[in-house]
Amino acid sequence: MSAAEAVIEIDSLTKSYGKFPALRGVDLRVERGQVHGFLGPNGAGKSTTIRVLLGLLRADGGTVRLLGQDPWRDVVALHRRLAYVPGDVSLWPGMTGGEAIDLLGSMRGGLNEDRRAELVERFELDPTKRGRQYSKGNRQKVAIVAALASDAELLILDEPTSGLDPLMEKVFQDVIAEARARGTTVLLSSHIMAEIETLADRLSIIRNGRIIRSGTLTDVRGDARTAVHAVLERVPDPNDLTRLHDVRLEGNRLDVTVESDRIGDAMTLLTGYGLVSLTVEPPSLESVFLRLYEDEDAAHAAGGTR
Ligand SMILES: Nc1ncnc2c1ncn2[C@@H]1O[C@H](COP(=O)(O)OP(=O)(O)O)[C@@H](O)[C@H]1O
Ligand SMILES: [Mg+2]
């Protein structure tokens, strides 16, 4: 076990809605000071897991520790130490955005006023409008500013940027990186690979109520193959290429994929044929994601029980 302190520790968490098992044994560990990406398609169980962490839902089984406490029993104490941004923020219709930010902030013992002002400006939020006048994106900004202007040790963000335009998405990425630099721990759920790819130290991928992969970006990327495109001086014998994957040979032009830890071997092999040109494409997180899903679907098709 690593020496780092776990801010979130979930073991074998189960939760059903009626007869429907939304979580079938979720394991998740988030260490202090890290941005942890929580990635999965719609319906995978991200929000259900987060609602359990927030003490909004009671777990059916398993154990959940949050900042060393029990999210169901210690809900009052915990909510002074964490800030939450949902994917669809509702605000008090008659209250201005600025008032809402202060009210949300007061739950966490007040806000850092300088940071509050700076965030309002960077997100180009007009805090004088009332809740009912705001678009979805602007309601989202109100919640993000309130969370980030607090000194919460833990930010729990459930698809927080749905509704933000690309420019604001960039601002969001910057402010999360700054929060991390201050030592804040972040759980960031998303179904957008690119968002996690830039921000997360570690990630967990959830599907059908179970974590199917967890690790650093490098670990998870290591699952996918690197594409290699080469033009060779001599046409290789296809029998020599059997250890490569997805081999396509047209004349002296070769396209293959290689496990990421075997690129060196592949280069040695190809150099033997004289390299005229070479392009190497490292796997995107997106391709990893799709591959994990294909593997899971194949397991289902093969008669897997889950
Ligand atoms: N209140 C609810 N009642 C019944 N089913 C629900 C409820 N909330 C979520 N679900 C179901 O549980 C599963 C997980 O949902 P959710 O945790 O919201 O996933 P995600 O946030 O990853 O999109 C989905 O199949 C969803 O339809
Ligand atoms: Mg959700």
Image (tube, grey):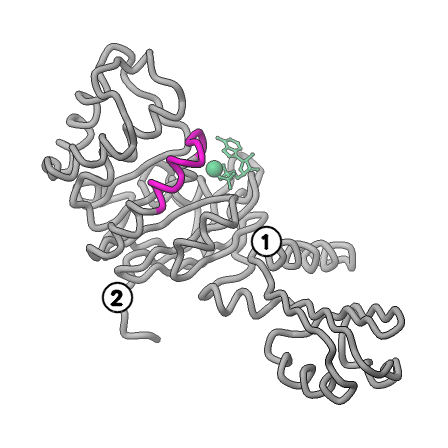
As for residue 83 lying within the magenta part, the answer is no
Secondary structure under the numbered disc 1 in the rendered image: helix
**Figure quadrant of the N terminus:** bottom left
Q: Which quadrant of the view contains residue 95?
A: top left
For badge 2, the amino acid type reads: Glu
Which mark is nearer the camera, 1 or 2? 1
| The CB of the residue at mark 1 lies under 8 Å from ligand 1 | no
Question: As drawn, is 195 to the left or to the right of 56?
Answer: right
Reply yes or no: does residue 164 show up in magenta.
Answer: yes
- CA gap, disc 1 to disc 2? 30 Å
The residue shown at (47%, 49%) is 14
Q: Judging from the image, what secondary structure is the residue with disc 2 in? A: loop
Residue 40: image tag? none
* Label 1 crowd (10 A; few <14 / some 14-19 / many >=20): some
Crowd class of label 2 (few under 14; some 14 to 19; many from 20; radius 10 Å): some
Residue type at tag 1: Glu
Q: Which label belongs to residue 286?
A: 1
Q: Residue at position x 63%, y 65% from top? A: 281
The circle on residue 5 is 2
Instruction: First in sequence, mark 1 or 2: give its number.
Output: 2
Stretch of the chain drawn in magenta: 162-173
- Point out the image quarter for the C terminus: bottom right
Q: Would you say 110 lies left or right of 291 here?
A: left
* Residue 150, position as x, y percentages in the image: 17, 40
